[in-house]
Image (cartoon, rainbow, N blue to C red):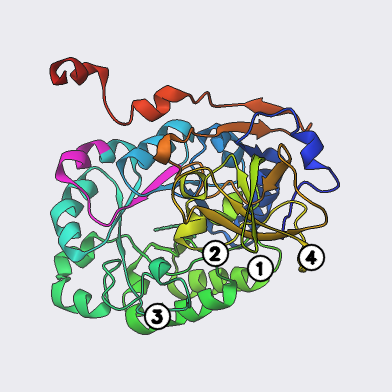
Amino acid sequence: MFSALDGEDPITLFSALKTPCYIIDEVQLRKNGEILCKVAENTGCKILLAQKAFSNYNFYPLLAEYLSGTEASGLFEARLGYEEMPDKEVHVFCGAYREDEFDELLQYADHIVFNSPHQLKKFGFSAKEKGKSIGLRINPEFSTQDGHGIYDPCAYGSRLGTTRCQWDTEMTSELVALLDGLHFHTLCEQNADDLVRTVTAVENRFGDILPKMKWLNMGGGHHITRWDYAISLLERCITDVQKKWNVQVYLEPGEAVALNAGYLATRVLDIVQSGDICNAILDVSASCHMPDVIEMPYTPPLYGAMAEKSAHCYRLTCPTCLAGDVIGDYYFGKDLHIGDMLLFGDMAIYSTCKNNTFNGMPLPNIFRLNENRMCRQITDFDYYDFKMRLGSKKYSSSAR
Ligand SMILES: *Cc1c(COP(=O)(O)O)cnc(C)c1O
């Protein structure tokens, strides 16, 4: 379902833009921000932006009005959060930190979450000395996801998070004493009922540890800004947890912060009938510009596409030479023509921060849609954004 842009015809709104391009919608970001801010106000929890889903720092000052800070997956995201959302908290979780980066990381991060007792032992003492708040990611070994195996950190043999068994063999009292908090992240696009069940699993495995902690970070994957999300159940869960163990709760959603807040505009380059299939070849690539369409996989919402089958069915495809670079089959109320603009929805998350220049495809420029519905360009990509990733002038002369 295509949502946002209430009551406007976005094709008219964006008709002057050169495609392909992403458009990020301030109004929708604010709507999401308000929902998240209210949860924080009602419960006393703190909500961070998980930058791996949305790192368009141009919008960090706007988001800072609603959020307590940023969450990073490593050094670069930690630096980005520190630089672009100043005076807010910077939290970092990384599967394994590097020795040659750790000192620099300490300049940016306030909370440092380790993945294993081994990493905690290696880096925790120096981090503590620098006044950082120290956490360990736990694995409650409780899967609530079905379907998307690659997004399940509780899958058998997962490297992510310390299981109770690992805790019991590796956590010395000296290591436990380092800890200020625990962190878990097990959800993906899920509702509050799955969080409640997960918290029970966390209590079953780590209930004896929690009273010694100052904070509990419940990770991301909370689809809080989705229309059917049970916010009151989430708020009750947070309040219960904070009361029961006297901890500060943190949430670090990525998707929920920028849900439905971006569009990817494209135009039809050609129409190719092959057997029964009518392919519309667009000027975007799923593989390059919306990689989760192939990786997850999913079919993104498209403005004007019909929910029911119709006579006008098109397979939306891409100009690259990857045969599987297909966005999906869509139904329309009328025929498509070369030059028509199409608009994909929910394109702010896991898109601009994940795209690439495979096949020499250009990076789509990014536009900022403000509350007066004016579009302002915020990037200036060209040929050199493709070329510079493959070599540097600095080294090229000796190779010739
Ligand atoms: C991916 C991730 C998030 C954000 O997840 P969303 O599904 O985008 O909400 C938060 N914390 C950690 C540790 C993550 O790996």
Number of labelled discs?
A: 4
Ligand 1 neighbours mark 2 (CB distance < 8 Å): yes
Residue that mark 4 sits on: 310
**Mark 1: which amino acid?**
Tyr
Question: Magenta segment range?
Answer: 89-104
Q: CA distance from mark 2 to mark 1?
A: 9 Å
The answer to whether mark 4 and mark 3 are in CB contact below 8 A is: no
Q: Is residue 104 above or below residue 218?
A: above
- Within 10 Å of the Cα at label 3, are there few (<14), some (14-19), or many (20+) other Cα atoms? some
Q: Which mark sits nearer the N-terminus, 3 or 2?
A: 3
Q: Position of residue 280 (x, y in %)?
A: 64, 49
Q: Which mark is residue 222?
A: 2
Q: Answer yes or no: do the residues labelled 2 and 1 have beta carbons within 8 Å?
A: yes
The residue most toward the front is 275
Q: Is residue 72 visible?
A: yes
What's the residue type where badge 3 is placed? Phe
Q: Secondary structure at mark 4?
A: loop
Task: Please indicate whether residue 354 sits to the left or right of residue 366 in the image.
Answer: left
Q: CA distance from mark 3 to mark 1?
A: 21 Å
Q: Which residue is mark 3?
A: 142
Q: Position of residue 379 (x, y in %)?
A: 54, 26
Asked if residue 102 lies in the magenta stretch, the reply is yes
Give the amino acid at mark 2.
His
Q: Quadrant of residue 364?
A: top right
Ligand 1, seen in the image, is in the quarter at bottom left
